[in-house]
Image: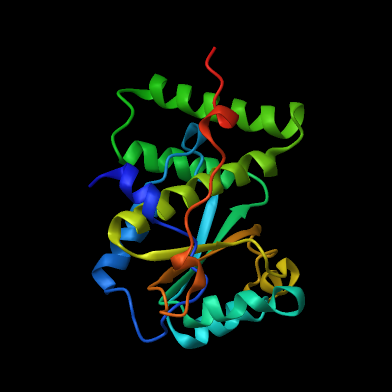
Amino acid sequence: MDLLNVSKTRYTTKAYDPDKKIPQEQFERLLEILRLTPSSINIQPWHFFIADHAAAKERIAKALVGKYAYNAPKVLDSSHTILLCTKADINEQHLENLLKRDEASGRFKDAQAKQGQKDSRSGYVDYYRNEKGDIQRWAENQTFIALGQVLLAAGIEGVDATPIGGFDEGIIAEELGLTEKGLIPSVLLTLGYRSESDFNAKLPKSRLVKEEVFTKL
């Protein structure tokens, strides 16, 4: 697969064909790619809500009202919609879960290696919480790495996609009980296949020229 060509041809879909669905096996591949996203110190500070049927997508669309109403058809007509959420804080339970998973995966040759991982990860979390004072921003940055990974994966798989930041965070948080779960809603992602009426599919791609985005040191 030519990644450069994928990058040139993928685009943000503005209208979906509601009658076209992503095959389940292919969607599971996308979810596995999402799960395998890299993150700083492998912190994985995320949780993903999957809407793969009409009732679930309608729950998401409750947050697409008022000035965000133009985004509702994208969710409702998509094959699948994913809400990417970020942990509001990194607590000890999450750190312990990560350490247990590391151990189960065979990453520690001995107890010293395990303790080293625990101390290193805790140190970084303490740094971002107490010294930088922006642990939530740091954590959410990791979630957007996940968004980028699945966007590229969708392009490779021939699936159209739309990242959506325009939604009512309060409504979606209440609908899904996110506060009680210790989560904040970061971004929506719709997946499916473009409609013939999607105007954006016919427009040329526009990016800043390389001289404006690269500086050779």
> Quadrant of residue 64 in the image?
bottom right
Percent position (x, y) of residue 43?
Answer: 51, 39
Q: Residue at image x 43%, y 69%?
A: 191
Percent position (x, y) of residue 7?
Answer: 39, 48
Q: Residue at image x 40%, y 56%?
A: 10
User: What is the quadrant of the C terminus in the image?
Assistant: top right
Taking the image as shown, residue 140 lies to the left or right of residue 77, namely right
Q: Is residue 24 visible?
A: yes
Residue nearer the viewer, 118 or 51: 51
Q: Residue at image x 57%, y 40%?
A: 208
Residue nearer the viewer, 88 or 153: 153
Residue nearer the viewer, 207 or 175: 207
Percent position (x, y) of residue 136?
Answer: 69, 44
Q: Is residue 35 visible?
A: no
Give the tally of numbered discs: 0
Query: Colour mode?
Result: rainbow
The correct choice, above or below, for 142 with respect to 169 in the image is above
Taking the image as shown, residue 213 lies to the left or right of residue 108, namely right
Percent position (x, y) of residue 100?
Answer: 41, 41
The correct choice, above or below, for 115 with respect to 93 in the image is above
Q: Residue furthest top?
A: 217
Residue nearer the viewer, 100 or 189: 189
The correct choice, above or below, for 127 with respect to 158 in the image is above
Taking the image as shown, residue 193 lies to the left or right of residue 96, namely left
